[in-house]
Amino acid sequence: MREDEKNMLLTEKQIEILRMKKRGMSQADIARALKTTRGNICIIENTALKNIEKAKNTIKFYRAMEAPIWLTIPGGTDLYDIPGKVFKAADKKRIKITVDSAMVIVKLKTEAADRIHGRLTNDDIDISVDEHGNLAIN
């Protein structure tokens, strides 16, 4: 294991399998090379990918937590009212948002699709804005 791989959420075996996949090997090929079953490779690979996703979400959450603007949009809010709330909060902190209202809505529809039904939010949506005006949907 390389020195930079020691403090990670992935095991040596997960790293090895992900590297083999990156080189284009199938799960069956990896299983033969490592003298194990394809099912075992599948489990190890899926666990690694879940750990990577959790790490990404943790970093995203941490960056959002550090952001100067953090809004919780409650369920039942009209989608088209949200950009105004974001811009108002940004104005109070003298931060210029990097996108316009339409892009705020597009971002919401793509990154929080599971929390929007029609024009209404059906669950809370956390929105953060960093000091550079970059918007994150959490």
Image (tube, rainbow, N blue to C red):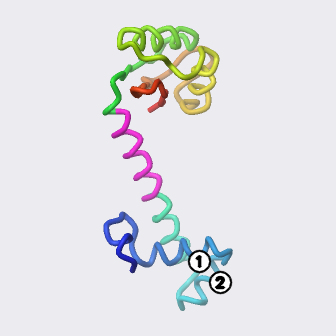
Where is residue 57? Give x, y as percent.
42, 45
Q: Is residue 106 above or below residue 16?
A: above
The tag earlier along the polypeptide, 1 or 2, is 1
Q: Is residue 89 above or below residue 32?
A: above
Residue hosting label 1:
20
Q: Which mark is residue 29?
A: 2
Q: Is residue 8 above or below residue 41?
A: above
Q: CA distance from mark 1 to mark 2?
A: 9 Å
The 10 Å Cα crowd at callout 2, few under 14, some 14 to 19, many 20 or more, is some
Amino acid type, mark 1: Met
Where is residue 28? Give x, y as percent.
65, 81
Magenta stretch: residue 85 in it? no
15 relative position to 101: left or right: left
Amino acid type, mark 2: Asp
Name the mark nearer the viewer: 1 or 2. Answer: 1
Q: Residue at x 62, y 71 (%)?
A: 22
Where is residue 7? Give x, y as percent.
31, 67
- Name the quadrant containing residue 110: top right
Q: Nearer the viewer, residue 83 or 54?
A: 83
The 10 Å Cα crowd at callout 1, few under 14, some 14 to 19, many 20 or more, is some
Which quarter of the rendered picture does the N terminus lie within?
bottom left
| Magenta region | 51-64
Question: Is mark 1 in CB contact (under 8 Å) with mark 2?
Answer: yes
Which quarter of the rendered picture does the C terminus lie within?
top left
Q: Residue at x 39, y 26 (%)?
A: 131
